[in-house]
Image: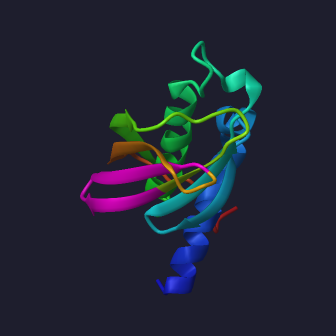
């Protein structure tokens, strides 16, 4: 597969995943880019995402990172799920912030992979660090063409 084909496949897989992902859509997430093993997702912090201390609820930050992770680990058109994730909250996000989650594959071998996500605000301030471990299951992201149909 050429680099151009791999980039196209990753982008198509990520777009397809987002189209099926009602939760990410409801949170206003935007797919900014995708490449093999990588994804960048944006989200603006809305008033309904603010918790009792006046900052963005950590669940929304986790969901943003988890979505970037999902798009990255499914970028090879192999159906892949999370088998473990962790997050460290570094600084608060506030209403009106525009967050960007950048996911980068650290390793991928056999059925498992390791991915790191960095969430930053619009000033480039680090908000959270996320690590996810993936597991390849049966199937593909994209529908397979059947030449007999």
Query: Residue farthest to the top?
Result: 52
**131 left or right, relative to 122:** left
Q: Residue at x 44, y 51 (%)?
A: 118
Q: Reply above or below: 142 against 46.
A: below
Residue toward you, 31 or 5: 31
Q: Position of residue 26 (x, y in %)?
A: 74, 32
Q: Reply above or below: 28 against 114.
A: above
Residue toward you, 28 or 53: 53
**64 left or right, relative to 111:** right
By secondary structure, the bulk of the magenta-drawn segment is best described as strand
Residue toward you, 147 or 144: 144
Q: Reply above or below: 19 against 22.
A: below
Q: Position of residue 41 (x, y in %)?
A: 61, 53
**121 left or right, relative to 112:** right
Give the number of marks: 0
Q: Reply above or below: 31 against 59.
A: below
Question: Coloring scheme of the render?
Answer: rainbow
Q: Residue at x 62, y 20 (%)?
A: 54
**On the image, which quarter does residue 78 sit in?**
bottom left
Q: Which residues are magenta?
A: 103-121
**87 left or right, relative to 109:** right
Q: Position of residue 99 (x, y in %)?
A: 61, 47
The answer to whether residue 83 shows anywhere in this view is yes
**Is 112 one of the magenta-colored residues?**
yes
Residue toward you, 92 or 26: 92
Q: Position of residue 73 (x, y in %)?
A: 43, 54
Q: Residue at x 57, y 58 (%)?
A: 40
The answer to whether residue 145 shows anywhere in this view is no
Q: Residue at x 34, y 35 (%)?
A: 86
**Is 39 one of the magenta-colored residues?**
no
């Amino acid at each position: 597969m050429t680099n151009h084909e791999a980039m196209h496949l990753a982008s198509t897989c990520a777009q397809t995943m987002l189209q099926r992902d009602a939760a990410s859509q409801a949170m206003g997430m935007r797919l900014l880019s995708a490449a093999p093993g990588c994804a960048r997702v944006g989200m603006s912090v809305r008033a309904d995402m603010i918790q009792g201390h006046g900052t963005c609820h950590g669940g929304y930050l986790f969901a943003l990172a988890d979505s970037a992770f999902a798009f990255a680990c499914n970028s090879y058109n192999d159906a892949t799920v999370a088998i473990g994730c962790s997050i460290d909250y570094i600084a608060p996000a506030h209403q009106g912030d525009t967050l960007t989650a950048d996911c980068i594959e650290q390793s991928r071998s056999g059925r498992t992979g390791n991915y790191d996500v960095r969430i930053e605000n619009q000033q480039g301030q680090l908000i959270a660090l996320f690590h996810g471990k993936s597991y390849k299951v049966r199937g593909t992201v994209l529908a397979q063409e059947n030449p007999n149909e």
